[in-house]
Structures are given as C-alpha cells and as structure tokens.
Image: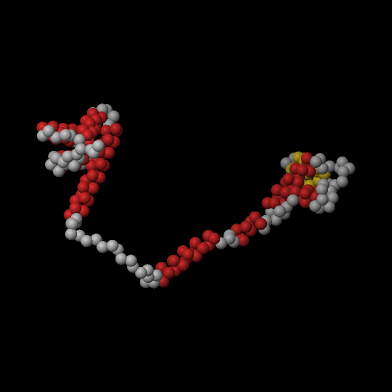
Amino acid sequence: MEKLSYQLEGFEGPLDLLLHLIAKHKLNIFNIEIAVLLEQYLAQMEEMQRQDLDISSEFLEMAARLVYLKTVSLLPKKEEAQELQKELEDQLLDYQQYRQAAGRLAQGFTWDRFVREPEKLELDPTYRRAHTPQELQAAYQNAVGRGKRFLPPPVEQFSGIVSRRMVSVSSQAVTVLRRLRREKQVEYAQLFVGKTDKSQLVATFLAVLELVKGKRIRVEDQGRVSVVVLMEDGRPMCREEGGSL
C-alpha cells in the first residue's frame, strides 16, 4: 500500500519543519534549545490536527524523539543527551545542504533544454606537455630508483656472511694439543693471543671445553692465573690436522 504523505506550508517532512522552526525563532542549529524547539513543534502538530490533516508517522516519530531527548537532558548524566542532540544536528545540517542543492538544480531546470549525446573523439597519443630539465631529471631518478628494486642485491651485502672464514673446532683442538705437547702447560689467556677473528676465538674456546670433557687436558688455577695442563695418560696426543682426536 502506498504511503500517504502531505505538504503543509511547504513542509515536506519533520526535518523540513524543524529547519523552519529554527529559522523562525532564530535558534542556533549548532546548539539547539530542545525545550523551545519541542514546544514549537508540538504547537505545529496541534495546528495540523485542527485542520483535520492526517499526521504522518514520521512527524509522530520526530515528536517522540524530541520528547525523549528533553527527558534525557534533565538527567544527571548528560552524555547520552549530548550524543542524541549531536546526531539530530548532523541530520538537520545534511538535510539543509540537500535542500539547498535541490534548489540550485531546480533553478537550472527547463523543459526546453536539449541534451546531445557525447561525440566520439579520435584518440591523439601525441604528448604536448613541456617540462623543465629539473623535472626530467627528477623523473629519471625516480624511474631508476624503482627499477633498482627488481635488481639482485650487490655482492657487498653478503661479504660479511659469505667471505667470513669458518674455523673448525677440531683444527683448534689440534693446535692446542700440539702447543701443550711442546710446553706441557700454558696460561689459558695465551691460547687466544694473536686471534682476532671471532670464529677463531669461539672455536678455540669450544676446543678447550671438548678437550677437558675428554680428559685430554685440565685447567688449574695458580694464584690469579688459569693454566691449561696436558694430561699424560698414555693416549695419543693427536692426529694430523683435520683428523679425529
């Protein structure tokens, strides 16, 4: 069933009526006095009833909304009232802009206007813009920078990984055993003298741990100095470098 609607003094709906009342009584649309607006709105509703007009449900819904908003504004917590009032203000502002836009479109409307279909233009690929040398240089640098993203990374980025010399624990264990075989005991700190590579330092430390675990050497404290001593247990000292201990 088609919804019944009417127009009273140019009012096309409740928002249109509210804007009329705000303008008539010079209310601030950004800070609406709900009590005044509700009073004027209900008075307009009574005028509709006196003229035996069927009041649309939209007008009744707006009246209930204004009554609820006034009731909430009287409560101690006004957060809900502020939120509801802000929502109403946004709707009124949007409706006001739509009505103004519709008025401008109506001014330009005429039944005598002829609309022609757009013509098909031939595509002209000729580039006719002029650029300064600085613009061309910036465009070239930008294009080169984008192209570099698809190039493989330079070798220098992998130099710290690929070119790093790997030192095995077995080779350092052989070196420690050979030195102890000549000197019988060595200060622990002397085993790391002359070794600046991190791989050598770590491999030497792990080699000492493995030799102590295998009871090939022992570490003793002599005062404040730690000394590595070769254990003579009759076992072979070592094999050739690269072999097993």
- Residue 47 at x, y percent in the picture: 12, 34
Question: What colouring method underlies this structural image?
Answer: secondary structure
Residue at the right extreme, as displayed: 234
Residue 26 image-quadrant placement: top left
Q: Is residue 125 above or below residue 61?
A: below
Q: Quadrant of the N terminus?
A: top left
Nearer to the camera, 117 or 58: 117
Q: Is residue 32 visible?
A: no
Left or right of 86 in this view: 129:
right
Q: Where residue 240 appears, x then y in whole percent?
A: 83, 52
Measuring from the top left, give residue 199's x and y in whole percent. Answer: 70, 51
Give me the residue at 21% from left, 47% from top: 99
The residue drawn where x is 21% and y is 53% is 105
Q: Is residue 89 above or below residue 155?
A: above
Q: Nearer the viewer, residue 86 or 18?
A: 18
Nearest the camera: 128 or 49? 49
Looking at the image, the residue that sits furthest to the front is 1
Q: Could you tell me if residue 199 is visible in this image?
A: yes
Q: Quadrant of residue 129?
A: bottom left
Residue pictured at 80% horizontal, 41% vertical = 214
- Residue projecting furthest to the left: 50
Q: Is residue 179 above or below residue 58?
A: below
The quadrant holding residue 15 is: top left
Indicate the position of residue 131 as horizontal and vertical percent values: 38, 70
In the picture shown, does residue 116 fall above or below 172?
below
Left or right: where does residue 168 sit relative to residue 156?
Answer: right
Q: Residue at x 19, y 53 (%)?
A: 106
Say whether residue 137 is left or right of residue 107. Answer: right
Q: Nearer the viewer, residue 15 or 172?
A: 15
- For the image, the number of numbered tags is 0
